[in-house]
Amino acid sequence: MKAIRSKQFYMVSKEILPEAILKTAQAKEILTRREAITINEAVEKIGLSRSAFYKYRDGVFPFYEASKEKIVTFSLLLEHRTGVLSDVLNAVAQMKGNILTINQGIPLQGTAVVTLSVDTYEVIGDMEELLEIFLNVVGVKKVEIVGQS
């Protein structure tokens, strides 16, 4: 009996992806936004062959789509000041994220590392927006996604 293998996923910067994969993602976004009704119309708009679209369509999707309905773990570097962590937690709440765990290290040299695990099932928007909101919180020095399940 054959073993069933689950799909493996990698997070890859778009700068290193081949043009056909990037254009496939763009075509899928055009279809999602209803800027094109048919696949043929979408691929014509961006200059991609239909065969390339069909080859890659099931293997490429935006990060926010991959992170929906998942647990995403963030690592944040915060200034050691009153209210910074509270503002981060409020940002998660505003996006309708559900915080599962919080781990804060002892502040060293004026900064502390905080790890947050967030259930993204009901998050409004996408992870890129949430990262941007984190970075706009006064006192947040750095944000990284360190894992997702």
Image (cartoon, rainbow, N blue to C red):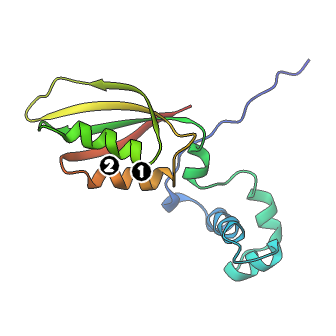
Q: Is residue 122 left or right of residue 3?
A: left
Q: Residue at x 58, y 40 (%)?
A: 121
Task: State the mark number for residue 86.
Answer: none
Give the residue furthest to the top.
1
Task: Report crowding for label 2: few under 14, some 14 to 19, many 20 or more residues within 10 A (C-alpha).
Answer: many
Task: Report crowding for label 1: few under 14, some 14 to 19, many 20 or more residues within 10 A (C-alpha).
Answer: some
Residue type pointed to by label 2? Phe
- Residue 30 position, x and y percent, is 67, 72
The alpha-carbon separation of the residues under discs 1 and 2 comes to: 6 Å
Give the residue furthest to the left.
109
Q: Nearer the viewer, residue 44 or 73?
A: 73
User: Helix or strand or loop: what does disc 1 sit on?
Assistant: helix
In the picture shown, does residue 78 fall above or below 60?
above
Q: Label 1: which residue?
A: 130
Q: Quadrant of residue 145?
A: top left
Q: Is residue 134 left or right of residue 4?
A: left
User: Helix or strand or loop: what does disc 2 sit on?
Assistant: helix
Q: Label 2: which residue?
A: 134
